[in-house]
Image (tube, rainbow, N blue to C red):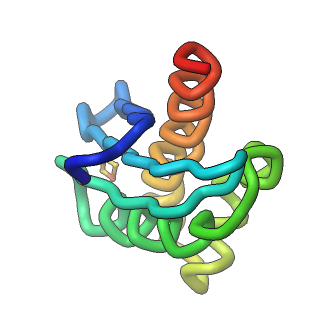
Amino acid sequence: MEDAQVVGTAENSACGDVLHLYLRIEQERIERATFKTFGCAAAIAAGSMLTQMIEGATLEEIQQLRKEDVVEALGGLPPMKLHCSVLAEDAIRAAVRDYKLKS
Ligand code: FES
Protein backbone atom coordinates (compact mmCIF):
# COMPACT_ATOMS: atom_id res chain seq x y z
CA MET A 1 0.00 0.00 0.00
CA GLU A 2 1.68 3.18 -1.14
CA ASP A 3 -0.12 5.49 1.29
CA ALA A 4 0.08 3.28 4.38
CA GLN A 5 0.40 5.20 7.64
CA VAL A 6 1.46 2.17 9.62
CA VAL A 7 3.44 -0.97 8.84
CA GLY A 8 3.64 -4.01 11.06
CA THR A 9 6.29 -6.58 10.23
CA ALA A 10 6.41 -10.05 11.71
CA GLU A 11 8.88 -12.85 11.12
CA ASN A 12 8.60 -16.48 12.02
CA SER A 13 11.96 -17.36 13.50
CA ALA A 14 11.36 -21.07 12.90
CA CYS A 15 10.97 -20.88 9.12
CA GLY A 16 12.09 -17.34 8.27
CA ASP A 17 8.78 -16.37 6.66
CA VAL A 18 7.86 -12.69 6.87
CA LEU A 19 4.56 -10.80 6.76
CA HIS A 20 4.17 -7.05 6.34
CA LEU A 21 0.80 -5.56 7.34
CA TYR A 22 0.00 -2.12 5.91
CA LEU A 23 -2.73 0.01 7.46
CA ARG A 24 -4.53 3.25 6.79
CA ILE A 25 -6.18 4.45 9.98
CA GLU A 26 -8.85 7.12 10.27
CA GLN A 27 -10.09 8.22 13.70
CA GLU A 28 -8.75 5.08 15.44
CA ARG A 29 -10.47 2.82 12.87
CA ILE A 30 -8.81 0.67 10.21
CA GLU A 31 -9.84 2.24 6.93
CA ARG A 32 -7.78 -0.06 4.74
CA ALA A 33 -5.55 -3.07 5.33
CA THR A 34 -3.27 -4.90 2.92
CA PHE A 35 -0.42 -7.31 3.34
CA LYS A 36 2.64 -8.68 1.62
CA THR A 37 4.27 -11.88 2.67
CA PHE A 38 7.23 -14.04 1.87
CA GLY A 39 5.63 -17.11 3.27
CA CYS A 40 3.86 -20.39 2.80
CA ALA A 41 0.29 -20.86 1.56
CA ALA A 42 -1.02 -20.87 5.14
CA ALA A 43 0.73 -17.56 5.86
CA ILE A 44 -0.78 -16.07 2.69
CA ALA A 45 -4.24 -17.32 3.68
CA ALA A 46 -3.82 -15.98 7.23
CA GLY A 47 -2.67 -12.59 5.94
CA SER A 48 -5.55 -12.36 3.52
CA MET A 49 -8.10 -13.32 6.16
CA LEU A 50 -6.53 -10.94 8.64
CA THR A 51 -6.94 -7.95 6.32
CA GLN A 52 -10.59 -8.86 5.75
CA MET A 53 -11.20 -9.22 9.48
CA ILE A 54 -9.67 -5.93 10.54
CA GLU A 55 -10.94 -3.51 7.89
CA GLY A 56 -13.53 -1.33 9.60
CA ALA A 57 -12.47 -2.41 13.10
CA THR A 58 -11.14 -0.06 15.75
CA LEU A 59 -7.57 -0.17 17.02
CA GLU A 60 -8.89 -1.46 20.32
CA GLU A 61 -10.78 -4.26 18.57
CA ILE A 62 -7.81 -5.44 16.52
CA GLN A 63 -5.68 -5.67 19.64
CA GLN A 64 -8.12 -8.30 20.93
CA LEU A 65 -7.65 -10.43 17.82
CA ARG A 66 -5.71 -13.66 18.35
CA LYS A 67 -4.19 -16.16 15.96
CA GLU A 68 -6.93 -18.60 16.94
CA ASP A 69 -9.54 -16.14 15.60
CA VAL A 70 -7.78 -16.07 12.23
CA VAL A 71 -7.51 -19.86 12.14
CA GLU A 72 -11.20 -20.22 13.01
CA ALA A 73 -12.18 -17.73 10.30
CA LEU A 74 -10.16 -19.78 7.83
CA GLY A 75 -12.09 -22.89 8.82
CA GLY A 76 -8.99 -24.35 10.44
CA LEU A 77 -5.42 -25.11 9.40
CA PRO A 78 -3.58 -28.43 9.45
CA PRO A 79 -1.85 -28.91 12.84
CA MET A 80 1.60 -28.56 11.28
CA LYS A 81 0.55 -25.17 9.82
CA LEU A 82 -1.02 -23.63 12.93
CA HIS A 83 2.17 -21.73 13.72
CA CYS A 84 1.82 -19.82 10.43
CA SER A 85 -1.10 -17.85 11.89
CA VAL A 86 1.28 -16.39 14.49
CA LEU A 87 2.57 -14.06 11.78
CA ALA A 88 -0.88 -12.45 11.56
CA GLU A 89 -1.12 -11.84 15.29
CA ASP A 90 2.45 -10.60 15.55
CA ALA A 91 1.96 -8.24 12.57
CA ILE A 92 -1.02 -6.63 14.31
CA ARG A 93 1.02 -6.09 17.48
CA ALA A 94 3.84 -4.56 15.42
CA ALA A 95 1.43 -2.32 13.49
CA VAL A 96 -0.20 -1.05 16.68
CA ARG A 97 3.26 -0.37 18.14
CA ASP A 98 4.17 1.55 14.97
CA TYR A 99 0.94 3.55 15.20
CA LYS A 100 1.55 4.48 18.86
CA LEU A 101 5.11 5.52 18.07
CA LYS A 102 3.93 7.79 15.27
CA SER A 103 0.97 9.26 17.20
FE1 FES B 1 6.59 -20.36 7.64
FE2 FES B 1 4.11 -21.11 7.26
S1 FES B 1 5.88 -22.33 7.09
S2 FES B 1 4.80 -19.24 8.03
Residue located at (26% from left, 68% from top): 41
Q: Is residue 62 left or right of residue 4?
A: right
Identify whether 13 is placed above or below 57: above
Identify whether 17 is placed above or below 72: above
Identify whether 22 is placed above or below 9: below
Residue located at (61% from left, 32% from top): 96
Residue located at (32% from left, 56% from top): 35
Q: Is residue 51 left or right of residue 103?
A: left
Could you tell me how many numbered marks the image carries?
Answer: 0
Furthest residue toward bottom: 75
Q: Quadrant of residue 5?
A: top left
Residue 47, percent from left and from top: 41, 61
Q: Quadrant of the C terminus?
A: top right
Q: Nearer the viewer, residue 88 or 33?
A: 33
Residue located at (49% from left, 39% from top): 91
Furthest residue toward top: 101
Q: Quadrant of residue 48?
A: bottom left
Q: Nearer the viewer, residue 2 or 88?
A: 2
Q: Is residue 88 left or right of residue 54?
A: left
Residue 56, percent from left and from top: 65, 69
Residue 37, percent from left and from top: 24, 51
